[in-house]
Image (cartoon, coloured by chain):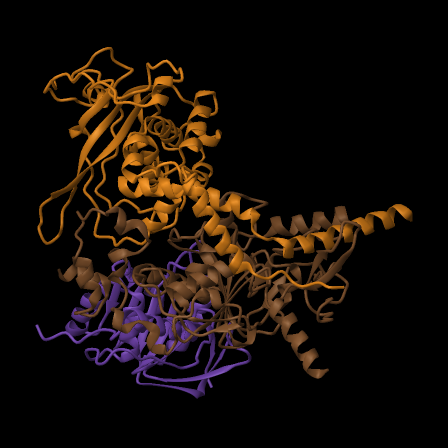
Amino acid sequence: MAYVAVKGGERAIDAAHAWLAEARRGDAAQPELSLEQIEQQLGLAVDRVMAEGACYDRGLAALAVKQARGDLIEAAFLLRAYRTTLPRFGASLPMDTGAMRIRRRISATYKDLPGGQVLGPTFDYTHRLLDFALAAGGTPPPAPMAAPEGEATPRVTGILAQEGLMAPEAKSDAEPPDLTREPLSFPADRPLRLQALARGDEGFLLAMGYSTQRGYGNAHPFVGEIRMGEVAVEIAPPELGFPIEIGEITVTECQMVNQFAGSKTEPPQFTRGYGLVFGHGERKAMAMSLVDRALRAKELGEEVDAPAQSEEFVLYHCDNIEATGFVEHLKLPHYVDFQSELEKVREMRATVFREAAE
Amino acid sequence: MTELTPGFADPVLGAQSCFRAILEAMSRPGRLQRVAGIEQPPAPLGLAAAAALLTLADADTPVWTDAGAAAEAWLRFHAGCPLVAEPREASFLLATGRIPSLATLAQGSEEEPHRSATLIVEVKTLAETVGWKLTGPGIETEHRLQVAGLPADFPRQWAANRAGFPRGVDVVLTAGPWLAALPRTTRIEEA
Amino acid sequence: MSTMRSAEGGAPLGGEHRSRESHGPTATRSAEGGAAPGGEHRSRESHGPTAMRSAEGGAALGGEQRSRASDGPTTIEAGYNFGYLDENTKRMIRRALLKAVAIPGHQVPFGSREMPLPYGWGTGGIQVTASVIGPQDRLKVIDQGADDTTNAVSIRRFFAKVAGVATTEHTAEATIIQTRHRIPEVKLREGQILVYQVPMPEPLFRLEPRVSETKRMHALADYGLMHVKLYEDIARHGHIAISYNYPVMVGGRYLMSPSPIPAFDNPKMHRMPALQLFGAGREKRIYAVPPYTSVHSLDFEDHPFQPIRANAACALCGARDSYLDEVVTDDQGGRMFVCSDTDYCNTRQGSREAAE
């Protein structure tokens, strides 16, 4: 019998990479996408990749989208793998989203409020009709600009807090844990949970948040406020002794307000679910705030019985880089273990048939 | 302040080769390993002890030592490790004089026994064909190890340390460029 | 500046400091800078170009020439730190490894990093190997027992690129063997390190998915759940129905997953002269079995542990003692068996030919 063990893994890999490069480029008669085009015209894809890739760099995220052929989880993975190799210079100071230069700000809990409702660049009230004019291309007319009102835009939760209606968050100067340097451990405190959720998969958080609205978890949410815009990032180098601004990033913040009936120690008031996401990522910020609130069940003395309330379930499964790796690793060869299973099943079948024959 | 002497001549490969020596030592308790890569650590730091700390300690690991100001400055500069006054707060301890009692050091918990201290002791001499009989994981039948410079009650302290398994302290003994390790699983019988 | 410098633990005038300073926190990463995982950002930990490992005498052999069983050291791809990981990460992993060796079978959590390979494809093993490996080492990588399976090729290439170390397919020549799903047939010796890639480090996870619960069980050495599961297998099937990833007790204290090796390989772990290290990247756990440590496959007195292998001889080398892969040769039920350990099989075939 002429059997030769399969060889040539290296050549196969090289050939596959070459094919991938060709497929990525597509029909060479078409102009190639530039990173600038991706960054400008597929901006929300770039934002999502930055958020789940946990690395704020639009140019690199655009490159990742291009390299991944538009597969956004693959792109986030590329960005994460790059991120790990970067030197760590220090930690930024807490960002003040209250001082955000606002491009969008809406509240569902008040008709009008100081600072006003700012719709910004939203899909919300578009009719979801395919726009065939877009297929033809062209430059849209400039959008009308209102003069900035110049007044401050206080947070809705702050307005509620003035009346004592909003449960205050525990202040702490403790160094927050760092998910990128220490593995998750349980019970996970809120800073750790929020870190995990902030880079978690949008689809997973969406489904989890949705489940809390359908009765799996005790949720009575109102969107206190969603705001999106630019916020300064500051660091305080020890050799300077005072903070300096190192740049500005776009973030989306959602503060979800929930009724809370009170407990033995707390009067009835509203509690907060919090979402913060790199870039313009409203769906994820909202879902994150629902899940954050659900995960506070234990702390607030509520029953913990729904999936979205289980720390281990949510935090161990929200990371799409981990999830995709493990799901997809099933396509690696497993024939050694399968051989053992074959022999074991044959042995067990033999036992069954032998017993049946007796 | 006096001039600081250099750390590893090659920080990357020096640490790698020192780590392999420590890994081998921890895997084969009582077997001597020779370490190189540092020219002249400040006294009373021996070469192996200094190299071990540069290999393992950094800003994430509080270090306790009795080796004095020059050694502390050297460690702070090259390893960037915080130095602590309380032995129980340290991840790594380097004793050149009297060793702190093992029972006072971080032992880890039943769930997290790895959160325990590693004690490095600079001793007078180490020899491996005579002395204590060591048995346990990492040892095929028995290893011999003779240590000059440990307190007389060390074997008793060690027995108590071992009895607390999986909690407990791990020890690295150094003498100049040589080192040997005693993981918490090793049983010591005095010859 | 002294704080930055000392945090790196580098020599006062090391090249790494210069390059670190060359881009402050505000430096924007241009598209080119980030294109290759490399560029100047990576250079901070690497010793300067003059210290590169070509001094070992290795010509820059491309990964393509890997058809030979052994390759000499190669030069490290410019811009990478030796072993890819930065020195802080290596120190963290090295600390975890030492505690793992000191507490045989106990899972030590570690700050697993995102690697340029997907989770589930060996990121834990790769991080362990990267933290251990040095220029004197000779690395062998196997997947399913074979050196030329695609994932093994990919991992071996990775280390040739970022550590420039010599590689080999010969088990006996290797100082570090990274493996997925097998233990080589040849008895390993002192001076060798076997690094296992581990998908699920927790042996109890199918019985109790909550890590907070399994942690408590390990603390109490409460392994009743597993014994009950095995007992139920026997009651229902007459056999323990586990054929791979068969749980073991290490040093009589910790229940441990041997990684998904076939149960056939379990006995090789017992009192192995080589050091065994286990890395689970996605689950962020490291554990170890020191040399000459007892590793016992769980069983019952009336149902002793039985390693499984196909009852056949290797069609290529005739071995009757090795683990065999079943190869389907046609669609009529034709099949043959060949050694899963390709080096073992090749060596046996070679010595048979020499004898003829």
Shade representing chain A: orange
Q: Nearer the viewer, residue A268 or C1?
A: C1
Q: Nearer the viewer, residue C128 or C159?
A: C159
User: Is residue B165 something that shows in the picture?
Assistant: no
Q: Is residue B137 left or right of residue C128?
A: right
Residue A272 spot, x, y in % from top left: 30, 26
Chain for colour brown: C
Vertical arrangement, residue B76 with respect to residue A234, above or below: below
Residue under the image location 21 percent in, 42 percent down: A173
Shade representing chain B: purple
Residue B129 position by quadrant: bottom left
Q: Residue furthest top?
A: A111
Quadrant (top left, top right, bottom left, bottom right) of the N terminus of chain A: bottom right
Vertical arrangement, residue C124 with respect to residue C188, above or below: above
Q: Residue furthest right?
A: A358
Q: Nearer the viewer, residue A15 or C103?
A: A15
Vertical arrangement, residue C177 with respect to residue A243, above or below: below
Q: Is residue A270 left or right of residue A4?
A: left
Q: Is residue B156 left or right of residue C81?
A: right
Residue under the image location 28 percent in, 58 percent down: C42
Residue C267 spot, x, y in % from top left: 64, 67
User: Is residue C156 something that shows in the picture?
Assistant: yes
Residue B17 spot, x, y in % from top left: 35, 74
